[in-house]
Amino acid sequence: MDAPSGRPTTARVTIGNENWDFPVRNGTIGPDVLDISKLYAQSGRFTYDPGFTSTASCESKITYIDGDEGVLLYRGFPIEQLAEHGDFLETCYLLLYGELPTPAQKSDFDNRVVHHTMVHEQMMRFFQGFRRDAHPMAVLCGSVGALSAFYHDSTDISDPHQRMVASIRMIAKMPTMAAMAYKYSVGQPFVYPKNDLDYSTNFLRMCFAVPCEEYKPNPVLARAMDRIFILHADHEQNASTSTVRSAGSSGANPFACIAAGIACLWGPAHGGANEAALKMLAEIGTVDRIPEFIKRSKDKDDPFRLMGFGHRVYKHYDPRAKIMQKTCHEVLSETGHKDDPLLEVAMELERIALSDEYFIEKKLYPNVDFYSGITLKAMGFPTTMFTVLFALARTVGWIAQWKEMIEDPSQKISRPRQLYTGSTRRDYVPISTRKS
């Protein structure tokens, strides 16, 4: 049966001589969705979808991606417009509340975030329990999970006010904790936040200021940092976001849920992609070696892969990459790295990817990780901090998705099914009678 618009309202599933009709749900944009929530109850069968590449796990109004067309929208607004004209805290407000703030709302929101940037002083002792050579992501994951031990007044997820306080706290405290993780890893004293600085400038100061000299903010680097945060703020139901929703579906407190997202993001196939891209550029080294590596990348028997090209979702040019390319040039020019050999390698690789028939056919376009790694390196961050910065930016997306899930009356605890292929039922045999 079709709706007046011509879009189908039901779909029939046929197995052998049996038929079942299931509703088809229509989003505001994007493909229609076959609602199979009652498939098992009616047919006694599950679907099999490894990686959930064809399965919608929830209904959401936050982020929309069209991978074929290279589109990324936050609450309907193109990522290009937000990164070009807005700032990160405005994007945070948009993701949390669904609309761009008025001047009064923006001022109030910024003020609430600023006055939650400090962490409990006893967190200092918690950090000192880590080894000095601990990876910053290990420190961040553990310390964020520990926040629930310090802020008992915002862990009741059934209380809307506590959910709001927890949301603001996570957005405000994540830069402080990320900077603390960095400072601890390099053996420098922690730097407290300053309420008269904007979000990104404050973060850069907490990372790079030292007590022995005055820190001078660089507006070009601060703006670049802000754009990076905007570009990574949310990305629909990716692995870490799905992890946050899954953890939250059990009723876990928001700090534990964000820690779970950080743990998932740490994987090299997810948050570590920009670090891998930078390592690849360093391995290539110079422009004259590019043909050798291009040839290897086309050889299916060679384990080498070009990192920073292609995307699990985008089958077109990553819209974030266009903004990141411009930002990359601005940062390199400002920091005196304009002639960085890694950038020369990156630019030549980009040129080849956009003109080589193999890359075009395979749709291996440069993605945001291709540019963000070299940009962060030029700003002074070690590669171990790249995923930490990703987590900092993505926190607002995780919080927005968690908040939406908690407030959705149809949401259930996450419980995927499986296709069991192990042994069938068998009886226990005493060890004395087992044959060798």
Image: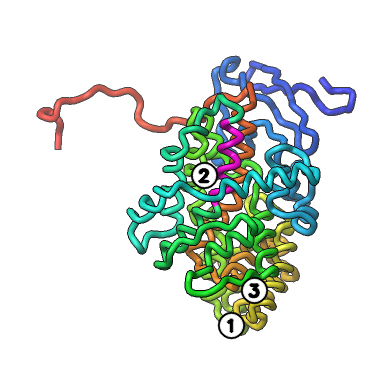
Is 313 located above or below residue 30 in the figure? Answer: below
Tell me how far mark 1 sits from mark 3, CA to CA.
10 Å
Disc 1 residue type (three-letter): Thr
Instruction: Measure the C-alpha gap from mark 2 to mark 3.
Output: 30 Å
Span colored in magenta? 162-174
Quarter occupied by residue 348 = bottom right
392 relative to 100, above or below: below
Q: What secondary structure characterizes most of the magenta part?
A: helix
Q: Is residue 355 magenta?
A: no
Query: Can you give x and y, in whole percent of width and height, for residue 298 in the image?
Result: 60, 68
Badge 2 marks a residue whose secondary structure is helix
Disc 2 designates what residue?
Answer: 261
Q: Which mark is residue 346?
A: 3
Q: How many dots with numbers?
A: 3
Q: Position of residue 13 (x, y in %)?
A: 67, 23
Q: Amino acid at mark 2?
A: Gly
Q: Nearer the viewer, residue 274 or 436?
A: 274
407 over 276 or under it: above or below:
above
Q: Is residue 352 visible?
A: no
Residue at image point 56% right, 50% down:
117
365 left or right, relative to 182: right
- Seen at 57% across and 64% down, the residue is 205
Q: Which residue is mark 1?
A: 286
**93 or 308: nearer the eye?**
93
Which callout, 2 or 3, points to the residue nearer the camera? 2
The residue depicted at 52 percent of the width and 40 percent of the height is: 243
Which of the two residues, 431 or 275, is positioned nearer the viewer here? Answer: 275
Quarter of the figure that contains the N terminus: top right
| Residue 54 seen anywhere in this rendered image of the structure | yes
**Circle 1 sits in a helix, a strand or a loop, which is it?**
loop
